[in-house]
Amino acid sequence: MTIFRVRINIFLGSFLACFLLVACKTTEQKKQGKEASTIQIFLENVNSAAEKRLITVGERMKTQVNVDLSPFADTADLLNATVVDIDEMGGFGIRLNFNDHGKLVLDTVTASSKGMRMPVLVAYTQVRWLGAPRINRRITDGSLVFTPDCTRQEAERIVRGLTNVIHKLSKPYVF
């Protein structure tokens, strides 16, 4: 009887230890799991008669661009986002990989708007214009890489938030 009791206590103790290890996340991991970011990509508007607004892109090197009032792509059009190294000197960029709808829209916009800019608006702890990459070629692979006007830590925070939002958007809606 004593052996049986000791054996149950060992099993119970090891089960509780495993449960606590699996169930306990650090507060930093929980905090990162709740971060959210959204992104919208606009198209430069050079038409003088169309509705547009003048924006200032960047904090370090300010660039003014007239943009359409509505974005052509947003967070719902993304599959994933990553921070990528661009060169050996420590340069980095944000890579946005689009879903099928996003690929089609990006292909259409870049095919018909060569030479124009695509201002990128992001909302995380603040709302700001991250960059305005110029369309040099048609983008058919659904992958947009741009150099953001932010620090690497901010870029990683933005990408974490985008990943969390993309993950939530990919879950089916349940009543």
Image (cartoon, rainbow, N blue to C red):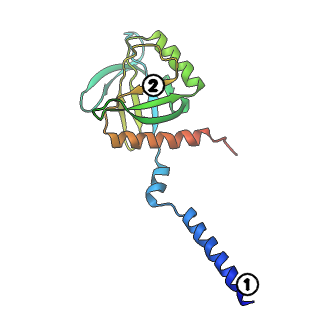
* Residue 39 position within the rendered picture, expressed as x and y whole percent measured from the top left: 45, 33
Query: Residue 174 vs residue 50: left or right?
Result: right
The N terminus lies in quadrant: bottom right
Quarter of image, res 115: top left
Q: Check disc 1 and report its element: helix, strand or loop.
A: helix
Residue under the image location 42 percent in, 16 percent down: 51
For mark 2, what is the residue?
Answer: 144
Disc 2: CA contacts within 10 A as few (<14), some (14-19) or many (>=20) = some
Residue under the image location 51 percent in, 44 percent down: 164
Give above or below for 61 relative to 66: below
* CA separation in Å, label 2 and label 1: 63 Å
* Residue 101 position within the rendered picture, expressed as x and y whole percent measured from the top left: 59, 24
* Nearer-the-camera pick, 111 or 82: 82
* Residue 19 position within the rendered picture, expressed as x and y whole percent measured from the top left: 60, 67
* Residue 3 position within the rendered picture, expressed as x and y whole percent measured from the top left: 71, 86
Q: Give the mark, 2 or 1, whose residue is nearer the N terminus.
A: 1
For mark 1, what is the residue?
Answer: 4
Residue type marked 2: Leu
Quarter of image, res 172: top right
Residue under the image location 39 percent in, 17 percent down: 44
- Number of the label disc, if any, that sits on residue 170: none
Inspect this view and state whether residue 124 appears.
no
Inspect this view and state whether residue 137 appears.
yes
Residue under the image location 52 percent in, 14 percent down: 108
Q: Check disc 2 and report its element: helix, strand or loop.
A: strand
Residue type marked 1: Phe
